[in-house]
Each structure stands twice: as C-alpha cells, then as structure tokens.
Amino acid sequence: EPEVTQTPSHQVTQMGQEVILRCVPISNHLYFYWYRQILGQKVEFLVSFYNNEISEKSEIFDDQFSVERPDGSNFTLKIRSTKLEDSAMYFCASRETHSNQPQHFGDGTRLSIL
Amino acid sequence: AQSVTQPDIHITVSEGASLELRCNYSYGATPYLFWYVQSPGQGLQLLLKYFSGDTLVQGIKGFEAEFKRSQSSFNLRKPSVHWSDAAEYFCAVGAEVLTGGGNKLTFGTGTQLKVEL
C-alpha cells in the first residue's frame, strides 16, 4: 500500500538555526498538509497546500514557517529560526482529489531544539 | 469552529473484553469524522471514517464506530480487545471543502488504551 514518507525521523537542531523537514506524499495525491504534536498534547493543524499554494494555515504557522513543493514528489516544511517551543513531532499528510477521501499520515519527524 | 472532545484520557481493559472510546464533536454542518490510532513512535494510522450514509461504519482491525447526530458523537467500539490494540486513539473531525483544498482535521486530545493480559 502506498505510504507517506518523512525524513529525517529525528532532527536535532540548535535554537535559531533553520531546519527543513521533508515529506514524500502518496504519488497521486494532490492535497498536502503539515501537523504537529507537542509532547503530551494533541495533534494540531499547521497548513494545507494545494495547486502550489497555501490553501489554509493556522495561527501557529507564522512568518517563521514556510512550505514548498520543490519538485513533483517532495513537500517540505521550513522553519527559519527555530525556537525551543518548536520542539515537537511533525506529521505530513496527503489525500486524493475528493474531500471525502481521508488524509494519510507519515510516521513523523521528531524535531528537538536545543 | 470545529472541535473534538475525547473525555477519557486513559482507559484500561482486559484482553478479550469489549471496548468503547468516546468522541464528541462540534461542527456546524455535516462533519467528516475519523478515528486514527498511533502506536509509540509511529504515525497516525486511519482506522475508519464516516462521510455519509450508514451511521455504523466498519474499520480495520475489527473496529467499528457509530455516528449519532443527535448526540454529536462518534464512539469507537471493538467487541474483543487484543493486547496489540494498546495504543493512543485519536478522533478527528474535518469539513467538506468543495474547491481549493483545505479540509483540515481537528483532533481530540486522544485516549491512551492499556490492555491487561
């Protein structure tokens, strides 16, 4: 069964550094998402992306965050200047064309900011 | 705004016993409802979904859920729990978006299931 893959599985970064989290969505999917889960808390929506532009973003997704689909397969989340509170598990998800199809999630990237 | 409440943070059941995990949602229109399961260190695996039609939906691993509009609930059930079902379970609500993407999911805080042998 096709899967969403995320790399790396664990990223350790110094505060203030830039970090890029990578995702390869399922190949025929057109809608892409990033969510995060701070340890012990619920999964929170960050941003959705369709047709090469952001379709919706949450309050969390401020100017420090950006997303990009640099080629036909990858979908990236960049945090420009990381803060301690950015430490979390970041999940990428994708879904097919119709909104009545579920989002499929990757295994996540654990981001640790020191 | 959409929201999800999972009132039980932790639940412990004996292997072979039945299970019901509660989920209540708040959404202005007909919601899209999902249950996901997360094992330690893993991602979110879809158990089942409800969009329309039959209010009792079947999922993977022997799970089912029933949509009750009058109670704004979408409880997850399993008649006989296996030790491998120990994990965290998340209920989520999404919206239909006809154009332009979106359809973000709003998750509950999760229910941690422990299975006693």
Image: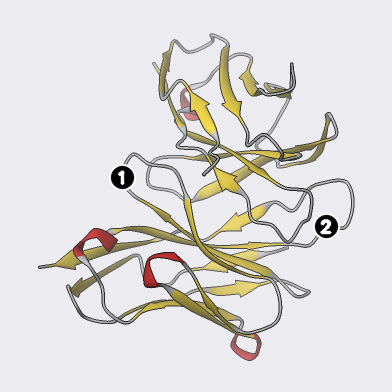
User: How has the structure been colored for display?
Assistant: secondary structure
Which quadrant of the figure has residue B98? bottom right
Residue topped by disc 1: B40
Q: Quadrant of the C terminus of chain B?
A: bottom left
Task: Give, as a three-letter code, the residue at label 1.
Answer: Pro
From this viewpoint, which residue is outermost toward the right? B99
Q: Position of residue A70 (x, y in %)?
A: 74, 16
Q: Position of residue A89 (x, y in %)?
A: 45, 34
Residue B54 to residue A22: above or below = below
Tell me if A7 is positioned left or right of A55 in this view. Answer: left
Q: Residue at x 58, y 11 (%)?
A: A18
Tell me if A58 is positioned left or right of A51 in this view. Answer: left
Q: Residue at x 49, y 29 (%)?
A: A85
Q: CA–CA distance between discs 1 and 2?
A: 32 Å
Q: Nearer the viewer, residue B35 or B82?
A: B82
Residue A54 to residue B99: above or below = above
| Circle on res. A78 | none
Q: Residue at x 61, y 82 (%)?
A: B72
Task: Give, as a three-letter code, the residue at label 2.
Answer: Val
Chain designation of label 2: B
Tell me if B32 is positioned left or right of A3 in this view. Answer: right
Residue topped by disc 2: B97
Q: Position of residue A31 (x, y in %)?
A: 74, 41
Residue A52 to residue A56: above or below = above
Q: Position of residue A22 (x, y in %)?
A: 57, 22
From this viewpoint, which residue is outermost toward the left? B117
User: Is there one chain holding both mark 1 and mark 2?
Assistant: yes
Which quadrant of the figure has residue A38? top left
Label 2 element class: loop
Callout 2 environment at 10 Å: few (<14), some (14 to 19), or many (20+)?
few
